[in-house]
Image (cartoon, rainbow, N blue to C red):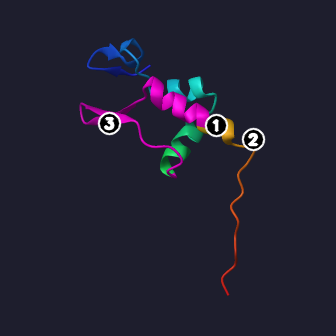
Amino acid sequence: MPLISGIRISAMKDAHSTAEAAKLIGISKSSLLRWLADGTIPEPKRVKVGGIEWRIWSKADIARARKLKATMRPGPKRIAFKPAR
């Protein structure tokens, strides 16, 4: 669990690191980061400490991601590809 200004993120009220959030959602950290990168879910609040930005996930952020996960089919996602003419 990462430390922010000497305080563990999990010790902060209603705050979780990305790894903790992924575990609570039931997905891998890489899947959660992919959802953020492709805009599937909005970015959570960020805190800058010592030149490093940390994402701080609230209970509401995690609930929103869980709701999205419930609507998704398991397995690899396929993107329709149309060759250029």
- Picture quarter containing residue 45? top left
Q: Amino acid at mark 2?
A: Pro
Residue carrying label 1: 69
Image location (x, y in percent) of residue 40: 54, 48
Do tag 2 and tag 3 residues touch (Cβ < 8 Å)? no
Looking at the image, which residue is at 52% across and 52% down? 38
Question: Disc 2 or 3, which lies upstream in sequence?
Answer: 3
Looking at the image, which residue is at 38% across and 12% down? 11
Q: Nearer the viewer, mark 1 or mark 2?
A: 1
Q: Secondary structure at mark 2?
A: loop
Q: Nearer the viewer, mark 2 or mark 3?
A: 2
Q: Secondary structure at mark 3?
A: strand
Q: Which residues are magenta?
A: 38-67
Label 1: how many Cα within 10 Å (few below 14, some 14–19, many 20+)? some
Q: Is residue 49 magenta?
A: yes
Q: Nearer the viewer, mark 1 or mark 3?
A: 1
Answer left or right for 4 relative to 16: left
Q: Is residue 18 above or below residue 3?
A: below
Q: Secondary structure at mark 1?
A: helix
Image location (x, y in percent) of residue 65: 55, 35
Looking at the image, which residue is at 55% across and 46% down? 34
Image location (x, y in percent) of residue 74: 75, 41
Answer left or right for 6 relative to 66: left
Q: Using the image, tell me which numbered label, if any, was put on residue 53.
A: 3
Quadrant position of the C terminus in the picture: bottom right
Question: Disc 1 or 2, which lies upstream in sequence?
Answer: 1
Q: Is residue 15 above or below residue 50?
A: above
Q: Amino acid at mark 3?
A: Glu
- Picture quarter containing residue 44? top left
Residue carrying label 2: 74
Q: Furthest residue to the top?
A: 11
Q: Amino acid at mark 1?
A: Lys
